[in-house]
């Protein structure tokens, strides 16, 4: 065992050296992040990342290391570097500090908002029977708005319209915004609040509360007719690495019917069919293909989410009937192509998909 012990000792020493090198790399990346911020350079540089990955793969081959392993390691380091650069340099705020009441601050995204705003230096109060650790709690809406200059509504989807009206009826006349996943069913409530003098806008963070970095993340901003609300709420995110997309309420819901509605539904259908099959999960894992395993990663992430929320995203979308009709037509077309022994129809969908993915890119 002497030789094994010696080799294990060398591995431990190599591990320690590796961690030290990683630490050095992250410190250098943090310094680059500060310089990029000062120079107005975007956090993400895809050409640089591509070069790093290609160089790592080439170096790996020269050292007997699998190129895929080198790329995987470098992707992890790039991701951590971006997180560190964003934390230190791309999460600033240059506007006036606000006193923000987060209604629903005890929920997942509510807690994320609380942490985000507190990190920018704003004063945060929470209205939520569940509470929110580390933040001041108010007993009711009346006491919550007494000192608030801005209100963020992060309550369950179906309660948002009533909450917007409650804020308007409370006498609050500052900036208020929601983070609901759908917007069309809020139109009347938003118009009601605006009519009473509330400065309203509506946003949709296209990520969940577990997100560690806003790099490569998107927030949709829907203009509800208040220039001040738009400026204040966009200002919270203007110094971060998040991508800001402006959409009308109609454009938002139409796109979300595919981005959320279709993707959620297909994964639920996939799981439902597996549950109703004659196989257990373990049975299928024994012979699982790469495609099956990849699909299961996404499907499991959906199935473990809040089913009531996912139902509401389906039910409240005004474009759901159109989406379901298209889904039935496409599904029938593909299955009929196989049953009718029409390979061209089936293969044409692959060609159309490949062309769609390329789009206008060269």
Image (cartoon, rainbow, N blue to C red):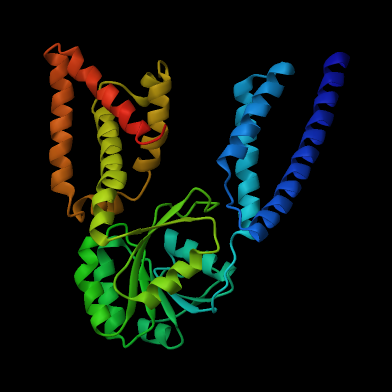
Q: Quadrant of residue 11?
A: top right
Determine which quarter of the picture holds residue 129: bottom left
Q: Is residue 127 visible?
A: no
x and y percentages locating residue 328 in the rendered image: 14, 34
Residue at (36% x, 42% y) in the render: 302
Q: Residue at x 42, y 17 (%)?
A: 286
Q: Is residue 189 left or right of residue 32?
A: left
Q: Toward the viewer: 89 or 23?
A: 89
State the residue in front, 212 or 306.
Answer: 212
Q: Is residue 198 left or right of residue 131?
A: left
Quadrant of the image occupied by residue 360? top left
**Residue 76 picture location, percent across and down:** 61, 37
Residue at position x 51%, y 79% from top? 98
Q: Going 23% across and 51% down the picture, which residue do you hit?
A: 254
Please tell me which residue lies in front, 28 or 132.
28
Residue 251 visible (yes or no): yes
Q: Residue furthest toward the front? A: 362
- Please provide percent x and percent y for residue 70: 65, 26
Quadrant location, the N terminus: top right
Image height of 305 relative to 170, above or below: above
Query: Residue pushed farthest top?
Result: 341
Left or right, residue 221 beside residue 132? left
Where residue 271 sits: x, y (%)?
29, 33
């Amino acid at each position: 065992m002497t030789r094994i012990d010696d080799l294990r000792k060398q591995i431990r020493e190599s591990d320690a050296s590796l961690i030290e090198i990683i630490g050095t790399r992250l410190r250098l990346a943090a310094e680059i992040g500060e310089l990029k911020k000062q120079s107005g350079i975007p956090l993400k540089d895809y050409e640089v990342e591509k070069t790093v990955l290609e160089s790592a793969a080439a170096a790996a081959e020269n050292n007997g290391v699998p190129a895929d392993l080198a790329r995987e390691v470098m992707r992890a380091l790039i991701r951590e570097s971006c997180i560190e650069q964003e934390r230190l340099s791309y999460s600033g705020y240059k506007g006036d500090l606000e006193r923000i009441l987060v209604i629903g601050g005890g929920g997942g995204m509510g807690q994320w908002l609380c942490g985000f705003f507190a990190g920018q230096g704003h004063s945060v109060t929470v209205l939520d029977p569940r509470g929110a650790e580390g933040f001041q709690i108010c007993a009711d809406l009346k006491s919550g708005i007494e000192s608030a200059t801005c209100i963020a509504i992060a309550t369950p989807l179906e309660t948002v319209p009533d909450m917007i009206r409650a804020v308007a009826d409370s006498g609050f006349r500052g900036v208020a915004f929601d983070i609901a996943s759908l917007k069309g069913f809020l139109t009347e409530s938003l118009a009601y609040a605006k009519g009473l003098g509330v400065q309203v806008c509506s946003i949709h963070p296209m990520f969940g509360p577990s997100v560690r970095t806003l790099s490569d993340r998107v927030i949709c901003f829907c203009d509800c007719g208040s220039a001040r609300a738009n400026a204040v709420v966009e200002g919270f995110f203007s110094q971060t690495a998040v991508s800001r997309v402006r959409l009308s309420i109609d454009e938002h819901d139409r796109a979300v019917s595919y981005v959320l509605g279709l993707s959620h539904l297909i994964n639920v259908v996939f799981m439902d069919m597996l549950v109703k099959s004659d196989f257990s999960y373990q049975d299928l894992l024994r012979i699982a293909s790469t495609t099956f395993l990849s699909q299961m990663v996404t499907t499991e992430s959906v199935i473990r989410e809040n089913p009531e929320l996912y139902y509401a995203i389906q039910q409240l979308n005004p474009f759901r009937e159109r989406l379901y009709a298209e889904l039935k037509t496409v599904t029938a077309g593909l299955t009929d192509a196989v049953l009718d022994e029409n390979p061209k129809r089936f293969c044409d969908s692959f060609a159309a998909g490949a062309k769609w993915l390329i789009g206008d890119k060269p």
